[in-house]
Image (cartoon, grey):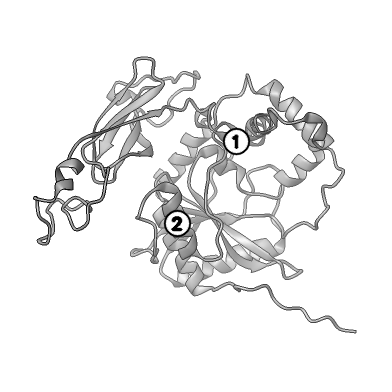
Amino acid sequence: MRTLYVTNGGTNSVAVVRLGRTCGGDSEDDSGEVDSDGGRSRVVGLIPTGWYPNSVVVSPDGSRLFVVNGKNLPGPNPGACRDTLETSPPPTCTSHNQYVLQTEKAGLLSLPLPSGRDEHWLGLSAFGPLARTVPDAAIMLDVLAGTTSYANPEPPERPLRIAFSVSHPLPGAKATAAAAAALNAAVGLLRDAGHVLTEQSPRYPITLGLRFNGRWLAGIAQDADGLDRAALEPRTRNMARLGARLSGRVKPASADPFGRQAAGFFAAGYDVLMTPTLTRGPDPVGTWQGKGWIRTMLGVANWIYTPAWNLAGLPAASVPFGSDDDGLPLGLQLVGPAGSEATLLGLASQIERLHPWPQLAPWHTATT
């Protein structure tokens, strides 16, 4: 499938557009998978660049992207005209500052184009914030993404169309009564806030778990490469050994058709999908100690709702909500279409305000 790269001067990024058949793209990509998006082109991601990119070209061998930035900031520029994205300089600016001409010179950015195999765990993993509050997570995401657009999230300005489901991506796995009750309580909370909630689940392929696990094991082999195998636990050694055998056969997560199926689910009319994060509360420390890798993998896979969205490559967040029978915290998973990070942060912020979670763990006084 052909890819188009488009500069976005206002957002300091290059958009990655997968071309559908209606725009001259191929019906199949390099992995042989057929385009199931109705022949339409779609934006699949944004690449951060320097200031105000205006030209982009791919190297002849397709391995690198070259971007010309119309402005850059090579030196101090106090009070001058080019320190904002505004099209008109503030009245206090002057064109006589010695750095203004310097900042109007173009800058050249060169970066590799990942094939998917170069990404960590073949694209299953991504860096994201872990924080005690939604505003803290938003600030951290700005730092990680090199943006200023996520800080200080506010509740959505319009009612969102939210699908919710307790259905687990793997056949046979079920949420406990406590996890289901937490989801239902959140549904009521958000309905009262004016959102439109519909019980609807994506269609999870029966082979989804196998497709995730092949890449997961290959990723473990990547992490173990160069380590002293004798120093690893037997379970980890076995996982790395099997992952090394699979690594030459598994394709990057971006090649899996579930990503396009998931995009179609949101395109059908949903802004957010809300599910439990886990089927049950935290397992006791040592639950998997001494267990083989197969038993561990199956136990964890039936516990978490998240792998489907690692595979789809869509933004998601886990928000504390409710508790299990032991009083330990549970969570809600919020998933959105590509580029919906701000929407998810806004909804998480609203949940945090309507249903605050404790900032400190409950204090249990021992009795005798």
Residue placed under numbered mark 1 in the picture: 205
Q: Amino acid at mark 2?
A: Leu
Q: Is residue 337 left or right of residue 83?
A: right
Rendering quarter of residue 322: bottom right
**Closer to the camera in the image, 80 or 167:** 80
Q: Is residue 227 left or right of residue 198?
A: right
Q: Amino acid at mark 1?
A: Pro
Q: Secondary structure at mark 1?
A: loop
For the question of whether residue 200 can be seen, the reply is yes
Coordinates of residue 85 in the picture (x, y in percent) = 22, 51
Coordinates of residue 259 in the picture (x, y in percent) = 49, 36
**Closer to the camera in the image, 311 or 186:** 311
- Residue found at the far front of this picture: 98
Residue placed under numbered mark 2 in the picture: 344
Q: Is residue 87 above or below residue 14?
A: below
For the question of whether residue 203 can be seen, the reply is no
For the residues labelled 2 and 1, the Cα–Cα distance comes to 25 Å
Dot 1, how many residues are within 10 Å of its Cα: few (below 14), some (14-19), or many (20+)? some
Q: Nearer the viewer, mark 2 or mark 1?
A: 2
Q: Residue at x 37, y 38 (%)?
A: 47
- Residue found at the far bottom of this picture: 368
Q: Secondary structure at mark 2?
A: helix
Q: Is residue 323 above or below residue 34?
A: below
Q: Residue at x 86, y 83 (%)?
A: 367
Coordinates of residue 289 in the picture (x, y in percent) = 85, 47
Task: Locate the N terminus by quadrant.
Answer: top left
Q: Is residue 319 above or below residue 55?
A: below
Q: Residue at x 43, y 19 (%)?
A: 28
- Residue found at the far right of this picture: 368
Q: Is residue 56 left or right of residue 246?
A: left
Task: Locate the C terminus by quadrant.
Answer: bottom right
